[in-house]
Image (cartoon, rainbow, N blue to C red):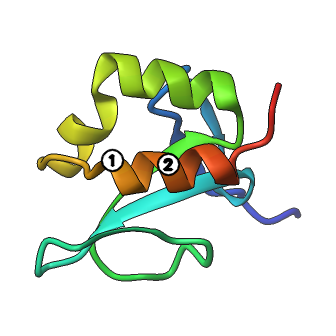
Amino acid sequence: MGQNIPLRKCLGCDEMLGKKGMLRIVRSKDGEIAIDPTGKKSGRGAYICNDAECLAKAVKKRSLERALRCAIPQEIYDSLKESVTDG
């Protein structure tokens, strides 16, 4: 009847959630790391809830580095902090 909602695992809280409400971070083939607001950029993607607490957990656990298999520049973390909502 209804459409299936694609689920993705948050790197902060480890919960499976609908990907529409999450932030996607992508590493392209040439190694560039970017926030992907459309969710359509090609490359290896990782998801974080749109929540400051989940972002803090992901940073502390270094989940983003493991998921994207590379070092994450501080500018990306700064951009993510500006993008997430508090609480």
Looking at this view, name the residue that lies furthest to the right.
1
Q: Tag 2, which secondary structure?
A: helix
Relative to 65, say whether 56 is above or below: above
Residue type of the residue flagged with mark 2 = Asp
Residue type of the residue flagged with mark 1 = Gln
Q: Tag 1, which secondary structure?
A: helix
Snapshot quadrant of residue 33: bottom left
Snapshot quadrant of residue 4: bottom right
- The residue under the point 31% across, 30% down is 63
Disc 1 target residue = 74
Position of residue 44 measured from the top left corner of the image (x, y, whole percent): 27, 64
Relative to 72, say whether 2 is above or below: below
Evaluate whether residue 36 shows in this view: yes
Identify which residue, 63 or 32, lies in the foreground: 32
Q: Is residue 64 left or right of residue 29?
A: right
Evaluate whether residue 14 shows in this view: no
Identify which residue, 80 or 44, lies in the foreground: 80
- The residue under the point 35% across, 65% down is 26
Snapshot quadrant of residue 32: bottom left
Disc 2 target residue = 78
User: Disc 1, disc 2: CB below 8 Å?
Assistant: yes
Residues packed near mark 2 inside 10 Å, few (<14), some (14 to 19) or many (20 plus)? few
